[in-house]
């Protein structure tokens, strides 16, 4: 007899990736999306301290793609979102530096969709890297 776990019609049990995106990430993204706010136009989120599942805001500010690229972490995987200055569109990114430990690299890629889903309203994902400018994305 099929069960909820094995019945192909049910799609199985939906499981979470285990990521815990802290509320400050959504709050900061709401500030970026607010047309009246000009103080913040990017955010970078990553693992909170030594946590393996909690994601928090590591950096945020104004300056667009260039400032965000300059603030990328050198040893941790990170996620983020930016309001582009040239057209006001919202983009997201996932960045894993060369110095990122392999286990964290795998965990971060597993959590990618869960984190980027919190950054609602973006219409594109860019290939973020140090030195990136808005003209090149």
Image (tube, helix red, strand yellow):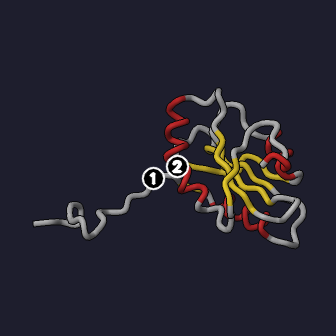
Residue contact at pointers 1 and 2, CB within 8 angstroms: yes
Who's the residue at 58% across and 37% down the image? 50
Q: Is residue 50 above or below residue 126?
A: above
Query: Residue 116, percent across and down?
Result: 61, 57
Under circle 2, the secondary element is helix
The N terminus, quarter of image: bottom left
Is 34 positioned to the left or the right of 116 in the image? right
Q: Is residue 44 above or below residue 50?
A: below
Task: Count residues near mark 1 (Cα–Cα under 10 Å), then give few for <14, some for 14-19, many for 20+.
Answer: few
Distance Cα–Cα, label 1 vs label 2? 6 Å
Of residues 27 and 101, the one drawn nearer to the viewer in this rendering:
101
Task: Count residues near mark 2 (Cα–Cα under 10 Å), then give few for <14, some for 14-19, many for 20+.
Answer: some
Is 112 positioned to the left or the right of 57 in the image? left
Of residues 53 and 120, the one drawn nearer to the viewer in this rendering:
120
Which residue does the numbered mark 1 point to in the structure image? 17
Is 46 positioned to the left or the right of 111 in the image? right
Q: How many marks?
A: 2
Under circle 1, the secondary element is loop
Query: Residue 118, percent across and down?
Result: 61, 62
Who's the residue at 52% across and 47% down the image? 53
Query: Residue 68, percent across and down?
Result: 80, 46
Who's the residue at 71% across and 31% down the image? 74
Who's the residue at 68% across and 63% down the image? 123
Which residue does the numbered mark 2 point to in the structure image? 111
Q: Is residue 31 above or below residue 92?
A: below
Q: Earlier in the sequence, mark 1 or mark 2?
A: 1
Query: Residue 10, percent across and down?
Result: 27, 69
């Amino acid at each position: 007899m099929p069960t909820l776990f094995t019945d192909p019609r049910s799609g199985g049990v939906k499981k979470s990736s285990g990521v815990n995106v802290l509320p400050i990430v959504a709050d900061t993204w709401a500030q970026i999306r607010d047309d009246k706010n000009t103080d913040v136009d990017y955010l970078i989120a990553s693992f909170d301290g030594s946590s393996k599942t909690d994601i928090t805001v590591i950096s945020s500010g104004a300056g667009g793609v260039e400032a965000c690229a300059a603030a990328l972490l050198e040893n941790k995987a990170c996620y983020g979102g930016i309001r582009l200055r040239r057209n006001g569109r919202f983009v997201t990114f996932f960045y894993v530096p060369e110095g990122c430990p392999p286990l964290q690299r795998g965990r971060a890629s597993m959590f990618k969709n869960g984190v980027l889903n919190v950054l609602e309203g973006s219409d594109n994902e860019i290939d973020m890297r140090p030195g990136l400018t808005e003209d090149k994305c």
